[in-house]
Image (cartoon, rainbow, N blue to C red):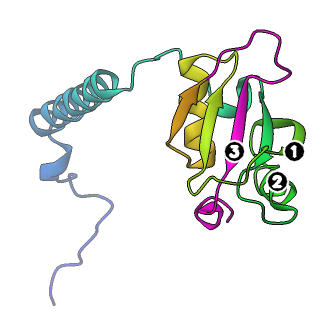
Amino acid sequence: MPEDMDLTNGAPQKKWFTSPWLIYPAIALILLGLGFFVYLKSKNAAPDTGEYLEDQLPAIKVLVLNGCGYEQLAAEFAAAIAHKNIEVVSLGDTPRPIYDKSIIVIRKGDMQDLKRLQKMTGISRWTSAMNEYHSADFDIIVGRDYEEYIK
């Protein structure tokens, strides 16, 4: 009769993955890898440029003018930009409906606000007619190309 095998009385066998010669270097390599990963993340992190988001800046005041004679065009354009950070101070018509292209007129705004306004409206053409007593920073004269800017 074969000898009874008793698993509880025998000497425990060491497993290869419990050896301290393997565990400690593995832990060291993992920690080194994590440290390198943290270093790369901190190095590639975007620096704080101090720039504000559009909704954190004050609204740009504009006067919207119908420059091509189409009925209610200034009101339609004002409605199209209502959800942007633009405050429409007044609506009106130009004395002569001769504008084929829409244009921004700088009245008392600065170039930084002009860039913001161009980005928000999509109108790239601009001119300057400074007037410190004007009711708005910019005039937007809406021309016959208005469909490009009303979306």
Report the magenta residues as a range. 129-151
Disc 2 marks a residue whose amino acid type is Ala
The one nearer the camera, 22 or 94, is: 94
Residue that carries the numbered disc 2 in the rendered image: 74
Dot 1 or dot 3: first in sequence order is 1
- The residue type indicated by label 1 comes to Gly
Helix, strand or loop status at disc 1: strand
The residue carrying mark 3 is 141
Tell me, yes or no, whether the highlighted magenta stretch contains residue 71: no
Give the mark nearest the N terminus, 2 or 3: 2
Q: In this orientation, does residue 17 appear? A: yes
Q: Secondary structure at mark 3?
A: strand
Label 3 sits on what residue type?
Ile
Residue to which mark 1 is pinned: 92
Which secondary structure lies at badge 2? helix
Distance of mark 2 from mark 1, alpha carbons? 7 Å
Residue at image location 69% in from the left, 21% down from the top: 107
Name the residue nearer the viewer: 52 or 11: 52
Residue 45 percent coordinates (x, y): 36, 26
Viewer-side residue, 14 vs 32: 32
- In the picture as drawn, the residue positioned furthest to the top comes out as 132
Q: Is residue 144 above or below residue 38?
A: below
With respect to residue 50, does 13 lie above or below? below
Query: Is residue 148 found inside the magenta-colored segment of the image?
Result: yes
Q: Residue at x 62, y 37 (%)?
A: 104
For marks 2 and 3, give the CA distance: 8 Å
Q: Is residue 76 left or right of residue 140?
A: right
